[in-house]
Amino acid sequence: LDLENIKENPGLRALAKICLNSFWGKFGQRPNQTKTEIISKPDRWYQVLLNSKLEIENIVFLTDDLVEVSYKQINEYVGNEHNTNIYIAAFTTSNARLRLYTMLDNLGEKVVYYDTDSVFYIFDDVEVKTGCMLGEWTDELGPGVHITDWVSTGPKSIAHTDNENRTTTKI
């Protein structure tokens, strides 16, 4: 990276975060997903219905000629997926959780709310090291901005107003 060319770009940052979360999610994906199939041919219908390696979860007769079948493989027949890696997924999750717990421990009773990757706290001359790199904490409000009004109805449900009279709601 050329440090001279790094510029703030919230849209690109959000896109990168989505890509990284999707990539991590793929590593932790269960290999035995339910499959849903619309069947119109009787031979395929019997092939699915009589397959001892499949567990039928749902059958819906859509018309006289169409049936929707949801099924998954019985666990002992699930193959090894080469695009998943439970160790990387577990490490990513545990590393993020340890970083969160360290921050919560440092802030103590000043914490108002926290989620998977964010902490809201009462600023009382507390120094929180922030940065713009992966794994670093960021100040999402901006320099000189602080929350004046706050409400939370539970997990993943917050709203606040800042000293520049901007309101943010996340549900």
Image: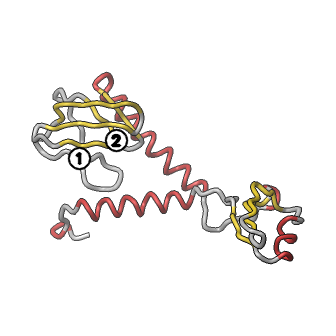
Quarter of the rendering containing residue 30: bottom right
* Badge 2 element: strand
Q: Nearer the viewer, residue 64 or 125?
A: 64
- Residue 43 horizontal/vertical position (percent): 86, 77
115 sits to left or right of 26: left
8 sits to left or right of 114: left
15 sits to left or right of 126: right
Q: CA distance from mark 2 to mark 1?
A: 10 Å
Q: Amino acid at mark 2?
A: Ser
- Residue at image location 55% in from the left, 61% down from the top: 26
Sort mark 1 into few (<14), some (14-19) or many (20+) by Cα contacts within 10 Å. few
Residue 140, disc:
1
Residue 56, disc:
none
Asked if the residues shown at circle 2 and circle 1 are in contact, with their CB atoms under 8 angstroms apart, the answer is yes
- Residue 20 horizontal/vertical position (percent): 42, 60
- Residue at image location 71% in from the left, 68% down from the top: 37
13 sits to left or right of 81: left
Q: Is residue 78 above or below residue 90?
A: below
Q: Amino acid at mark 1?
A: Glu
Sort mark 2 into few (<14), some (14-19) or many (20+) by Cα contacts within 10 Å. some
